[in-house]
Image (cartoon, rainbow, N blue to C red):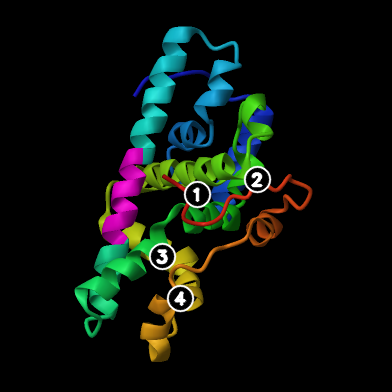
Amino acid sequence: MVQFYNFSTKRGQDIQAFLKIICISDLDKELIEISLMHPSYLCESNIDRKKQDLQEKEYRCLAQLGDAIIGAIVTDYLYEQYLDLTEGELTRLKQQLVNKVKLSEFARKINLHQYCLLGKSLKGSNLNEQGKLFAEMFEAVFGAIYLGLRRDFYSSKSWLIERLLTSTLDEVIDLDETDNQYEDYDYVLTTREYLDPIRLKDFPDYGWAAGDDD
């Protein structure tokens, strides 16, 4: 991995605070910083073009890795916990746990929005872009966590389950009413219902709803 730059004192403190929030103190701080720095911020920075390209590539790779490992963890966990569900039910449940809305909620729960760096052009972007952005940044952060835990699948799985997945699972499924839950799977999350939890109450309503993430 390329050494991109030295942290400022303030940014170093922010990274330490973020590590405290996620309760893992010995991760690679540079990887965490890369995962928290969106390419839009790099484009508006004074970092030379070659380093921008290298860091953006690293960020994209972390997000891709995080996406894959999150999917594997959720699949493994559901297989372990819900053998009585059919393949179709397990697939739909997984989709509910790893869609862009849920991943952006995970990002909010670890205060990612407070510590990430975004380009000015994205700070006023529409809701659909905001949801995708924080979902992707969570994937990048989790990719950095996975690497920081020395690619230990079960340590990574334990962190995701204990910190985020168990409480989220309780929200999306009632085991006594599984069929009804899936019948309501097309429920549309309103813009206001999405905005309130992420503290964007004054954000304009663009008519975006859950499921519009392709």
Question: From this viewpoint, is residue 194 visible?
Answer: yes
Residue 35 position within the rendered picture, expressed as x and y whole percent measured from the top left: 47, 36
Distance of mark 1 from mark 4, alpha carbons? 40 Å
Is-magenta flag for residue 151? no
Amino acid of disc 2:
Tyr
Is-magenta flag for residue 70? yes
Q: Nearer the viewer, residue 72 or 182?
A: 182
Amino acid of disc 4:
Asp
Amino acid of disc 1:
Ser
For the residue carrying disc 4, how many other residues have a C-alpha within 10 Å: few (<14), some (14-19), or many (20+)? few
Mark 2 highlights which residue? 206
- In the image, the segment drawn in magenta is 64-73
Mark 1 highlights which residue? 25
Above or below for 135 versus 122: below
Question: From this viewpoint, is residue 23 visible?
Answer: no
Quick one: label 1 or label 3, which is nearer the N terminus? 1
Mark 4 highlights which residue? 184
Quick one: label 1 or label 2, which is nearer the N terminus? 1
Q: Nearer the viewer, residue 182 or 172?
A: 182
Mark 3 highlights which residue? 96
Residue 144 position within the rendered picture, expressed as x and y whole percent measured from the top left: 40, 42
